[in-house]
């Protein structure tokens, strides 16, 4: 493990339920928590969650799917980065600590890679986390082999979103994780079908997420909301991305339009959009099975497969090729992945 420049302290905490270890790393832009799962000799997959979430509340639905877990853990060592103060058991960050910029958080990812001695990695981000990892990919192009993005953000906030976030910030600041804030976040994550109504109860995944939100430090969430509300437009930088990109978005996501916009700006030869019907933004939790086959095709372009298709685990550096033709075929996807559809633009 390498030192990123500042003083580095590593504290390992066994995660009995998941079998991982948590490292608390002092980066050049403040401390960050990274939960590591898998064999360090395998290629690295770095994840980053959405606002008010960490890997337990953002990726466990996907990793609880046996097929998805075998695909990911067979091929990768997973490094779950939490936004500052979002890890389990986090203390409230002092008000004297400046709120980081989105560039600070992207640079923090680079410090984490330096700490673990990682070169080029696969990145997997959700909404706000997708923005941070996309920004990281535009700043450190040689360090990103591929991007898997779920309901990603790539533009600056609209006035409506900016005002909405300001209201949420004020509620967090003065009232903490109150019911209104939790309802707003759940609306951000999930479709109304699983959020329930007066006639139907909330689904189990929504109830579990609501319970996990109660464990967050409200001022730490306030800081991340403030950071994301000051983000800038990445549209022009997207044209310089040098990696393959797979984008998932629920058709009922608040960020559906932005995901489609992003797909139109990334190099059309190396980007595919998978739209998941009857799903909100948090596809990893609401419909994780819908992600399996697209990810399989995506990884096949790097020479990676599910364990049932290999006798031994891949150890070599990933070799990125074009996205598999199957992934770029709406007809093929329609047969294999109902009720999923793809939207891609093939170069003539």
Image (cartoon, rainbow, N blue to C red):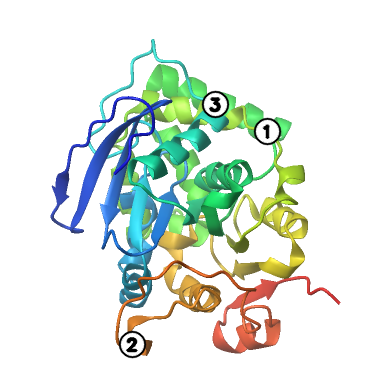
Residue 232 shows which numbered tag?
A: 1
Say what secondary structure mark 1 lies in: loop
Q: CA distance from mark 1 to mark 3?
A: 10 Å
**Label 2 crowd bin: few (<14), some (14–19), many (20+), radius 10 Å:** few
Question: Which residue carries the number 3 mark?
Answer: 101
Tell me which numbered mark, 2 or 1, is placed earlier along the sequence: 1
Mark 1: few, some, or many residues within 10 Å (few <14, many ≥20)?
some
Residue sitting at 45 percent across and 52 percent down? 119
Question: Disc 2 on helix, strand or loop?
Answer: helix
C-beta proximity under 8 Å, tags 1 and 3: no
Q: Position of residue 99 (x, y in %)?
A: 48, 20
**Of 307 and 183, the residue lying toward us:** 307
Proximity of marks 3 and 2: CB atoms separated by less than 8 Å = no
Q: CA distance from mark 3 to mark 2?
A: 43 Å
- Please indicate, yes or no, whether residue 196 appears anywhere in the rendered image: no
Q: Earlier in the sequence, mark 1 or mark 3?
A: 3
- Label 2 – label 1 distance at C-alpha: 43 Å
Residue 308: which numbered mark, if any? 2
Q: Which one is nearer the viewer's eye here, 100 or 185?
A: 100
In the rendered image, the vertical position of residue 6 relative to residue 153, given as above or below: above
Label 3: how many residues lie within 10 Å, few (<14), some (14-19) or many (20+)? some
Residue at the top extreme?
96
Q: Is residue 110 depicted above or below 295 in this figure? A: above
């Amino acid at each position: 493990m390498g030192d990123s420049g500042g003083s580095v302290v590593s504290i390992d905490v066994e995660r009995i339920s998941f079998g991982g270890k948590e490292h608390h790393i002092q980066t050049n832009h403040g401390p960050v928590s990274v939960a590591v799962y898998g064999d360090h000799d395998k290629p690295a997959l770095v994840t980053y969650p959405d606002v008010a979430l960490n890997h337990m509340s953002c990726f466990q639905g996907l990793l609880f799917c046996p097929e998805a877990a075998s695909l990911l853990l067979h091929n990768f060592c997973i490094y779950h980065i939490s936004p500052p103060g979002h890890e389990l058991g986090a203390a409230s960050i002092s008000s004297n600590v400046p709120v980081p910029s989105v560039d600070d958080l992207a640079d923090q990812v680079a410090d984490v890679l330096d700490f673990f001695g990682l070169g080029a990695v696969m990145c997997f981000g959700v909404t706000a986390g997708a923005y941070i990892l996309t920004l990281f990919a535009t700043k450190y192009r040689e360090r990103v082999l591929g991007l898997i993005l779920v309901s990603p953000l790539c533009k600056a906030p609209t006035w409506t979103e900016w005002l909405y976030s300001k209201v949420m910030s004020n509620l967090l600041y003065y009232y903490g994780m109150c019911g209104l804030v939790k309802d707003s976040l759940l609306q951000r994550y999930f479709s109304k079908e699983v959020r329930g109504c007066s006639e139907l109860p909330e689904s189990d995944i929504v109830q579990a997420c609501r319970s996990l939100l109660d464990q967050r430090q409200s001022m730490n969430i306030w800081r991340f909301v403030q950071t994301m509300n000051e983000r800038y437009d990445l549209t022009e930088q997207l044209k310089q991305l040098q990696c393959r990109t797979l984008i998932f978005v629920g058709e009922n996501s608040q960020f559906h339009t932005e995901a489609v916009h992003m797909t139109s700006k990334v190099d059309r030869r190396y980007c595919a959009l998978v739209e998941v019907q009857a799903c909100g933004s948090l596809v990893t939790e609401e419909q994780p099975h819908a992600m399996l086959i697209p990810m399989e095709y995506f990884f096949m372009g790097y020479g990676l497969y599910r364990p049932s298709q290999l006798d031994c685990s891949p150890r070599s550096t990933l070799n990125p090729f074009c996205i598999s033709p199957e992934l770029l075929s709406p007809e093929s996807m329609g047969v294999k992945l109902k009720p999923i559809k793809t939207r891609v633009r093939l170069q003539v």
